[in-house]
Image (spheres, rainbow, N blue to C red):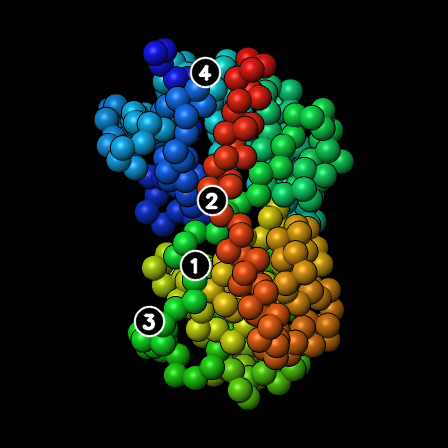
Amino acid sequence: MSRPPVVAIEATNLTDDRSTGIGRYTRQLIEALSALDLPPQDDFELLQLCKRSRWQRRDRLAQGQRLSSRMWWGPVWPLPRPSCAVLHVPDERQPPWRVPTVATVHDLYAALNINHADETKRRRKLRHYEHLRDTCTRLVCVSENTRQDFLRLVGGDPARLKVVHLGVSPEFRPQTPDEIQAVRARHGLDGPYLLFIGSTPNKNLVRTLEAFAAGGFGRDFTLLVCGERSQAQGDELAMRLARLGLTSRVRFAGFVSNADLPVLYAGAAAYLFPSLYEGYGLPILEAMACGTPVLTSDRGSCPEAAAGHAVIADPEDISALASGIASAVGMPQDRRAAALAYARTRTWEATARGTLAVWREALAEG
């Protein structure tokens, strides 16, 4: 029997123990691919490429299954052209090799320049996407909204842009009271709380704070804000909280571990995600999978991710956000159950199978 095709995955982001976003995507995709039980004619071997001083054999992630039976870690820059049929780049970085390539496009945030901060960066990012368009065999877009953004801003052959939605990891589930209480104690939470996660401007923290104050939610809830911030950002937020009278009602948790994250979701009265732009909005699904009602926005891919199971509000309207928070906190039990059931349908297995289909297209064309 001939050896199955080799697909190399550029996985330098897995070397960071605090990786978020792209790193989580890469790890979950590889683990889901390794768990697939494929017939021999559909099998692939995976070659992981990352920054290490030497090549190292890695044990298969799922014993007894063919896919990923040869997993390797190795240095990426510089490397000779890898011996592979297809290269998958999970974060839009263009490799230096001429090989059939699939790249994942997570969002066009910088190209859209949502905050009108850096026109030079926006132009540079557009040129980068144009290069991806011209050199990649296929592009995986994590949402239809991102695909449409790419076609509108960058152009290209629509048939080469494939939508493969992200999945929700099994650890995002309703938690036991004991699990919730342990994490609440670790974060100094002794009463009901609302949860906000994020530190980039598009996450819309300032308006969230203003809506929290306008709705008087500080009387009944603490707002737990997670995400790393600079000292200057922290000082600015402290002054804003003082002006809003929220100093004692908002708690900053900094970076939250992967172990604590599902429990914080599950223990929250609502998850607040009024983003100005998302390429997909996976936290919406993660919170719903934990049984927690979600407030999100009508921008970017947020409505696509929510699929009718979250409260939607204009993220620039403080009054609408305050009303949305109240609606999320008071979401009826049947709607919460429907959101939980929907989130459980969004699996990484489906993401892996969708990605395999794109690889097959690239392999056939390459």
Q: Residues within 10 Å of mark 3 (few under 14, many from 20)?
A: some
Mark positioned earlier in the residue sequence (3 or 4) = 4
Q: Residue at x 41, y 54 (%)?
A: 170
| Residue 113 image point, x, y percent | 68, 45
> Is residue 237 rendered to the left or right of residue 210?
left
Disc 4, SS: loop
Residue at the spot of label 3? 179
The amino acid type, in three-letter code, at marker 4 is Ala
The amino acid type, in three-letter code, at marker 2 is Trp
The amino acid type, in three-letter code, at marker 3 is Glu
Mark positioned earlier in the residue sequence (1 or 4) = 4
Pick out the residue farthest to the right: 152
Residue at the spot of label 2? 348
Disc 2, SS: helix
Mark positioned earlier in the residue sequence (1 or 3) = 1
Disc 1, SS: loop
Mark positioned earlier in the residue sequence (1 or 2) = 1
Closer to the camera in the image, 218 or 248: 218
Closer to the camera in the image, 20 or 171: 171
- CA gap between label 1 and label 4 equals 34 Å
- Pick the quarter of the image with the N terminus: top left
Mark positioned earlier in the residue sequence (2 or 4) = 4
Residue at the spot of label 4? 85
> Is residue 178 rendered to the left or right of residue 352?
left
Q: Residue at x 39, y 79 (%)?
A: 189
